[in-house]
């Protein structure tokens, strides 16, 4: 997989192949539930991607290098714009995204959801919440 940019989500063909055994136990469970990783800004050696795996809790983020060949698909934030208009079930974050979409589209600039909203739209795996987590701003 070449051309992946920060915030792009990559689908992994076989998440077990990228596990080294040194990552926290939740990483394997998270990848089994949703075999996707987000591209990070960090540098990666040739043939690899700097990626991050998200766990079910906000503090569960794990940085890793994955072989580029392990990625079988890519979802760029701007690819998720059409999905943002047909969101269900709806959380406050996704409702706000749907309401903002016409304004953002009207700017004539590329845009797309990232973070929890982008992850949920790309993977179908619930990542946004009905209420903000405690301790978030």
Image: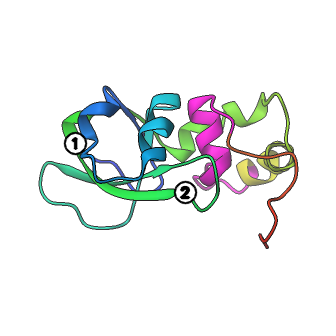
- 113 vs 123: above or below: below
The quadrant in which residue 35 appears is top left
Q: Nearer the viewer, residue 113 or 107?
A: 113
Numbered disc 2: secondary structure: loop
Q: Which mark is residue 60?
A: 2
* Residue 80 screen position, x and y as percent: 60, 37
Per the model, the C-alpha gap separating discs 2 and 1 is 23 Å
* Residue 74 screen position, x and y as percent: 40, 36
> Can you identify the residue that label 1 sits on?
68
Q: Is residue 9 visible?
A: no
* Residue 104 screen position, x and y as percent: 74, 53
Classify mark 1: residues with Cα within 10 Å, few (<14), some (14-19) or many (20+): some
The residue under the point 81% across, 28% down is 88
The residue under the point 41% across, 39% down is 28
Left or right: 42 with respect to 120?
A: left
114 in the magenta segment: yes
Disc nearer the start of the sequence (2/1)? 2
Quadrant holding the N terminus: top left
91 in the magenta segment: no
Left or right: 105 with respect to 92?
A: left
The quadrant in which residue 86 appears is top right
The residue under the point 62% across, 46% down is 56
- 16 vs 58: above or below: above
Q: Looking at the image, what colour scheme do you see?
A: rainbow
Quadrant holding the C terminus: bottom right
> Over which residues does the magenta segment extend?
106-126
The residue under the point 64% across, 58% down is 58
Q: Nearer the viewer, mark 2 or mark 1?
A: 2
């Amino acid at each position: 997989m070449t051309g992946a940019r920060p915030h792009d989500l990559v689908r992994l063909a076989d998440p077990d192949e990228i596990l080294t055994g040194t990552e926290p136990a939740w990483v394997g469970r998270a990848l089994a539930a949703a075999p996707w990783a987000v591209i990070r800004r960090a540098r990666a050696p040739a043939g690899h991607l700097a990626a991050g795996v998200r766990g079910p809790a906000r503090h569960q983020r794990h940085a890793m290098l994955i072989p580029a060949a392990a990625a079988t698909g890519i979802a760029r934030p701007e690819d998720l714009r059409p999905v943002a208009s047909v969101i269900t079930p709806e959380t406050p974050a996704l409702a706000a995204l749907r309401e903002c979409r016409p304004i953002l589209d009207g700017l004539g600039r590329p845009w797309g959801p990232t973070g929890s909203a982008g992850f949920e739209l790309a993977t179908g795996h619930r990542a946004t919440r009905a209420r903000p987590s405690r301790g978030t701003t």
